[in-house]
Structures are given as C-alpha cells and as structure tokens.
Image: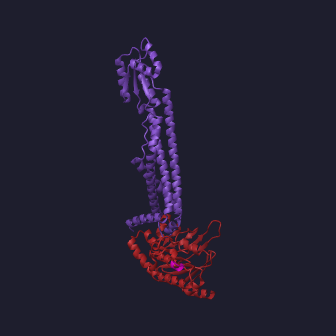
Chain colours: A purple, B red
Amino acid sequence: MSATAKAAYFWRAAVQGIRRAPFVHFIAVLTIALALFAIGLARGGGELLESLISSIGSEVELTVYLKPDATDADAKEIAAALSKRTGTEAVVVPPDVALGRLAAQLGELGSTLTGLPENPLPVSVEVRVPEAVRGPGGLRALAEKVRQSPAVEAVDYGEEAVERLSAIALALRWGGLVGFALVLLATAIISSATLQLAIYARREEIEIQKLVGATDRFAKIPFLIEGMLQGLAGAAAAVGGLHLFWALAGPRLSSLLAFLSVGGCVARGVDPVLALQLAGLGCGLGLAGSFVAVGRFLRV
Amino acid sequence: MFHVYKAYPGDPPSLSDINLHVRKGEFVFLTGPSGAGKTTLLKLVFCAEKATKGQILVGGRNIARIRESAIPYLRRNIGVVFQDFKLLPHRTVADNVAFTLDVVGMPRREGMARVTQVLKQVGLEHKAGSLPLRLSGGEQQRVVIARALVNDPTILLADEPTGNLDPALTVEIMDLLCAVNVRGTTVVVATHDASLIARYDKRTVRLERGLIVADQDGAKAARRMAGAE
C-alpha cells in the first residue's frame, strides 16, 4: 500500500468531486464567501468603531489649577511630573494666556474681561491624556496623585463626560463582540448545512466505498479536501468582495466619521493579516462542515 | 456459522439458529423464496449487518465480535456482487472497478493494468471508458463482478447475480462465477432461480422463513430442482 498513491487518489477524488457537481460546490463556496464577507465586514466595522472611540477619547484633557501663591518652578515641576507619568507633553498655561483664551471663548463679551482690576485666573498645567490612562479609574488615580502636591488648588478632567464616554465605548465593544460571535455561529451553521447538502448528493459513493473496504478515514479525506478547497475559494471571494467594498465605501465612511468626530478615523480595508485570518477561517469552516456532514453517512 | 440469529426490532426473526459450514474453495447456492433471509445471511458475512446472537467465523476469525475499525480490512478479502449493482453512475466502468484498488492504495498505473486484466476476464475491456448507465443489465452485472474480483478476494458473495438477466446472459454470468471458483475462490450465490440450481451441480442450502430447511450436495440438489421444474 503506497501512501503517495493514496494521497494522489485523495486529491484526484476531491477535484473530481468538485468537477462532477459544480453547482452544488458553487453554492457551498458562495455561502462560505458570504459568511466570511459578513465576518470581515463586522471586523472592519468594529475597527472603525474603535478608531472613532479612540479619536473622541483623544480629546480628553486633564487641567491642573495651581494655588495663587504657586511659583513658576512649582508649575514646571508639576508639568514635568505629569509628563513623566503620562508620557505626553504637559503644557504650563500662564494666567494671561488663560485669560486670552477665555476672552476668545466669550466672543463679544470677552472685552468685559479687560475691565477686571487683576487677572483672577491661576497658573494651570494642561495635559492630553494618553489612551492608557484615559479610563475613569486611570484619570481618577492620576488626579488624586496630582492633588497631593501642596501647590495644586484643583484638578479637572471632565469626570462626567469621561465616564459617559467610557460606558458608551464599553457597550459598543461588548455589542460588537456579541454581534461578531453571532455572525460566526450563524456562519458555522449555514456553511455546515450547505456542505451537508453537497455531501448528501454523494452518500451512495460513501456507502459503496465502505462496502468495498474503505476505512472511515479513507472515505472522509477527499470530502475534507473538498471542504478545505471550498473554504479557501470562499475566503478568496470574500477578500475580493471586502476589498471592493472598502475601496468604494471606505472613503465615504471615513469622511462621514471625520465629520462626526475630530478626525483620524480611517476605514483601513483588508490588510494581509485579515486576509490570512479569513483564509484560515474559511479552511476551518470547510473542514469542520465537511467533517460533520460526511460523518453522518459513514454508518454502513 | 454457529447458532446465528438475526432479528430486527418489531419484526419476526430474519434468521433463526443458522448452522452452516462452507469450506474453502467451495461453491454454494443459497436458495429460498423472497424474504427467506438469503440477503441477510450474506450481509452478516461482510458485516453490513450484525448478528443478534451466535458466532460467525470467516477465515478462522469470529466476525460476530469484530471491532468496527477492523471491518474494512475484512471486506477487502470479500468480493460482493450486489443485487442492485451499486455502481457509481458518474464514473466510468474502469473507474468503478479501480475503486476497490484505490481503497487499498494501489498505484494508479498498476491498478489500471489489473483493471484491464479483470475487464478482459469478464469480456468488457472494450467498455472500460463507458459510463455504467450506457451499458445493458448484463454488462452492468459483469462490471460488478469485475469490481468484486479485481482485488483477488478469497470469498465472493453474489446476491441474485442473474436476477435481471435473460437466460443467455444468466449462463454467461454463472459460467464466469464458476470459473472464478475453479481458480480457488469460495463462491456463495444467493438465488431463488430453481432452473439455475438444476443446471449447475453445486451444493445448495435452502432457507425458508429464516431457517435452513435443506442442505444438499450438488447432484442431489440438481435432481431435486430438476424435479421441481
């Protein structure tokens, strides 16, 4: 018994199987392709959502107001400590700059500020919070730490807004995860059912194979190869479809999201990693679907 | 076979207390009316069914207790000619016959040489590239015999191999089976055709309602069947 002869037979049988029933195999490939396309789209949408959340979150800013008697050295020391802790640059805002900004924000009413006998605004230090400490817990801890300095009067980071944003992000991530899991489950069920239909048409062949002395493994392997090839073909079609989708819809989506947020949200399309993941998933789906389907007809 | 029983839930027993010994190289007719249990008995031998009770020894091995994983290897030593042919309609005659050799992993070139040889033996070498549905009933039956013989089995089981054939083709197929037997293969033919048994001087086992009611040597059986005709 030659292993090479058997391997040659398995591949020959798989290819012949596909050639003999092209329509059924086309349906199976189409089902897998649609399922993988939906998964790829869900993942791309999830990434876009993450990018949107991250883009909105990048606006989170922590402002430290110093006491009136705080010196420039105190401000620089706090800015340095903040920079070290957050890894981003902390900016010292002198009182006159702060007053200028306030006047600008007030617009026409800003001119009333010029009548003030003295600048009431303190020296402040501003820092754009990096993603690592952007959550409510991280920001609270950072604010507490900064508050311990004797030169600090108050710390503000828009606590309520941050908590709301964080809750929305969490809900979207969990929703996305559940949606992704559902799509994956539906894909597995539909693909398996379609492959079962394809194999059902050839149950007689399996029966005859068993009756002339084929082992279960021998009868299964050509179907598993067929399943794997269908999965790969489905993945290739899905990657092609996704590429086309992002090429057509990506720029529009990016511009829409840029309008909603501050920018930085880019629909990335299909990267090689996603293409490989879809190919792997397609192979897995094809193999698992065929394995389950062919098993039902082996009891001869 | 020793005290073999086969029963399906809710039905009367298909086989009851079957005791049968077929020697190596023997030719045996298994006869009886439809529903007597002939096909069931053959199925027990190639493990398409499991005996409810009793022992079945094939080549000294008790197949009543055989592991599922060992069944394919047993089947490779038993050629079966099915009543309903069981040919793959989308594969050529040669591919249908070669199927058995693919299962044992014989290289294609070597396998095709063997297929050609066995097709010649059954007189179908000129139909190697045809699809089974384009052949006559007799030709299809001969393809099935070729498939059963291609692996040089030690036992050949034939279930009503001439059931759908005209008298001339029946003789042709039976002569083929006799020739296989002469070369040393044990042959068991299930048939309800009395004229066939009368024509060939072979041991005949008669089944009725799942019981062996007669087991006669060739001459006796032929005389009895000739009388019955």
| In the foreground, A233 or B92 | A233
Q: Is residue B1 visible?
A: no
Quadrant of res A115: top left
Q: Is residue B19 magenta?
A: no
Where A180 sits versus A119, above or below? below
Q: Which residues are magenta?
A: B135-139
Q: Is residue A3 left or right of residue A136?
A: left
Q: Residue B90, how many percent across, how many down?
A: 49, 70
Q: Residue A222, how many percent across, how many down?
A: 45, 63
**Farthest residue in the top direction?**
A117
Where A70 sits versus B133, above or below? above
* Marker count (numbered): 0
**Farthest residue in the front direction?**
A108
Q: Is residue B137 magenta?
A: yes
Q: Is residue A86 visible?
A: yes
| In the foreground, B187 or A159 | A159
| In the foreground, A109 or A65 | A109
| Residue at the (38%, 72%) spot, across then down | B109
Q: Main secondary structure of the magenta part?
A: helix
| Quadrant holding the C terminus of chain B | bottom right
Q: Residue A263, how many percent across, how many down?
A: 43, 35
Where A11 sits versus A148, above or below? below
| Quadrant holding the N terminus of chain B | bottom right
| In the foreground, B140 or A291 | B140
Q: Residue A163, how many percent across, how many down?
A: 50, 30
